[in-house]
Image: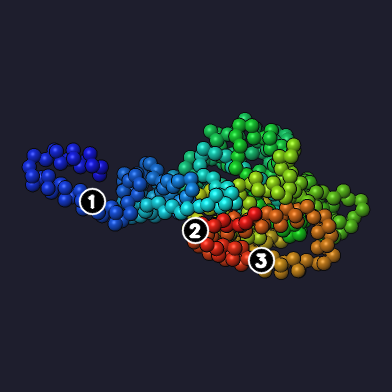
């Protein structure tokens, strides 16, 4: 109640007894509101089931409080409500009162390391899909996120053409890529066409990178399974392996023109024109960089970067669904995980598991890949360092521990309050 509203209500009472009783009611309401941390704009599900209530922090703060977006009201028993989003039919349970905002101060250095951006229908987001970096899994992750009305209210996925491009050399009609039409793009496009692909809006850039040796091996195994599968089904398709069962044989074949997907493929896809992107330093222009080997922590960093605080709270325990295009066929038996929406993702590698995988690669094969992926390795090393710095900021701001974070990055956070996070 405002002072003016209380005065008006008191004026309506013609007796002292009425005024006194009303004043007591007002005082009790105000005191209970303070005790229960009333929200900024509303106190009841019934009052807000058709609107939004959200925390608002200053530019120098990060909001850790709930972003309360409500769908259709299913039930309200004054102690808790169940809300169902009409688009994906998920049922969410929220308290009948949103807690007040938990605003945490963030420094200029933290903001320079983590380029925060709102997840909103007012903007566009471009996931540059690099093959065998977990991109298909992330495409489905984005699709499900967009369909969650409680998080992505009013947002839409953009339609694209994959193979072959109908809008060559683009993956979509440039006129259609605008926030008024759609918001999220996930495509295997090349950054050298970026300036002519996005004419109507400047998207927030998203990418996953993977250790070059592991990515290249995964690419070859994927292509070999896919091509074998197409042959069994008597279908035509691109041939990258030239019938070789081992990557070392492909590398050693003098008659083969090696496809760049088995060399510096990540740099190949990301390098732009007119010095728009040159690597490795310009990877900082990507608002979000995920590392495939640390997929779950990458998802947490995604929520943190785009201020999706509601999902950030449970990101380390939520299940992940894995998708693999090569596993679609019934004849395929060599899949690491099944292409099923309900299945849990395969275990994501920790640092020691990555080293173990690299040590298990035949030395001569590893050497041949490393000789052909030196630029990718420089990019990956630079990006991974930046990734851990951003995770360290996330750990500091949220006051939660992310187990994947290497100790040397966490130790750099042990410093006097309000000092910079990382020295230049």
Specify the label residue 351 is tagged with: 3
Q: Earlier in the sequence, mark 1 or mark 3?
A: 1
Residue 190, quarter of picture: top right
Decide which of 136, 355 is in the foreground and name it.
355
Task: Kindly state the secondary structure of the residue where label 3 is placed.
Answer: helix
Q: Could you tell me if residue 316 is visible in this image?
A: no
Task: Kindly state the secondary structure of the residue where label 2 is placed.
Answer: helix
* Closer to viewer: mark 1 or mark 3: 1
Judged left or right of residue 35, residue 91 is right
Q: Position of residue 41 (x, y in %)?
A: 34, 44
Q: Identify which residue is drawn at 61% across, 31% down.
A: 200
Q: Badge 2 local density, few (<14 within 10 Å), some, or many (20+)?
A: some
Q: Quadrant of the C terminus?
A: bottom right
Q: Earlier in the sequence, mark 1 or mark 2?
A: 1
Disc 2: which residue: 398
Residue 350, quarter of picture: bottom right
Q: Identify which residue is drawn at 37% across, 41% down.
A: 50
Q: Position of residue 264 (x, y in %)?
A: 78, 51
Q: Quadrant of the N terminus?
A: top left
Specify the label residue 104 is tagged with: none
Disc 1: which residue: 29
Task: Kindly state the secondary structure of the residue where label 1 is placed.
Answer: helix
């Amino acid at each position: 109640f405002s002072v003016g509203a209380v005065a008006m209500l008191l004026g309506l009472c013609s007796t002292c007894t009425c005024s006194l009783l009303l004043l007591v009611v007002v005082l009790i309401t105000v005191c209970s509101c303070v005790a229960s941390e009333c929200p900024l704009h509303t106190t009841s599900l019934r009052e807000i089931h058709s609107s939004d209530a959200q925390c608002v922090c200053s530019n120098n703060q990060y909001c850790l409080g709930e972003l309360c977006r409500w769908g259709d009201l299913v039930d309200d028993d004054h102690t808790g409500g169940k809300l169902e989003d009409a688009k994906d039919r998920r049922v969410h349970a929220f308290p009948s009162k949103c807690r007040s905002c938990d605003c945490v101060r963030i420094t200029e250095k933290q903001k320079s390391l983590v380029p925060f951006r709102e997840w909103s229908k007012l903007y566009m987001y471009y996931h540059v899909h690099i093959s065998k970096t977990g991109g298909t899994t992330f495409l489905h992750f984005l699709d499900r996120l967009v369909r969650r009305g409680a998080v992505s209210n009013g947002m839409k996925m953009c339609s694209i053409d994959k193979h072959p491009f109908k809008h060559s050399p683009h993956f979509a009609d440039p006129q259609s890529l605008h926030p008024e039409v759609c918001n999220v793009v996930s495509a295997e496009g090349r950054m050298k066409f970026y300036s002519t692909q996005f004419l109507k809006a400047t998207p927030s850039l998203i990418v996953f990178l993977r250790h070059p040796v592991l990515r290249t091996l995964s690419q070859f195994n994927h292509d070999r399974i896919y091509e074998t599968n197409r042959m069994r089904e008597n279908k035509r398709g691109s041939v990258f392996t030239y019938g070789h069962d081992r990557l070392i044989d492909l590398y050693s074949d003098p008659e083969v023109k090696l496809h760049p997907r088995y060399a510096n493929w990540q740099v190949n896809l990301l390098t732009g024109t007119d010095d728009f992107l040159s690597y490795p330093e310009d990877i900082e222009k990507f608002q979000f960089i995920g590392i495939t080997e640390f997929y779950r922590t990458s998802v947490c960093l995604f929520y943190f970067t785009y201020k999706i605080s509601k999902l950030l709270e449970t990101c380390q325990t939520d299940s992940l669904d894995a998708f693999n295009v090569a596993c679609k066929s019934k004849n395929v038996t060599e899949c690491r995980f099944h292409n099923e929406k309900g299945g849990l993702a395969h275990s994501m590698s920790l640092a020691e598991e990555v080293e173990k995988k690299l040590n298990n690669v035949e030395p001569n094969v590893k050497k041949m890949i490393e000789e052909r992926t030196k630029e990718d390795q420089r990019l990956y090393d630079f990006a991974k360092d930046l990734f851990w710095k951003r995770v360290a900021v996330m750990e500091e701001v949220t006051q939660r521990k992310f187990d994947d974070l290497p100790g040397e990055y966490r130790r750099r956070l042990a410093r006097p309050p309000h000092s910079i996070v990382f020295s230049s």
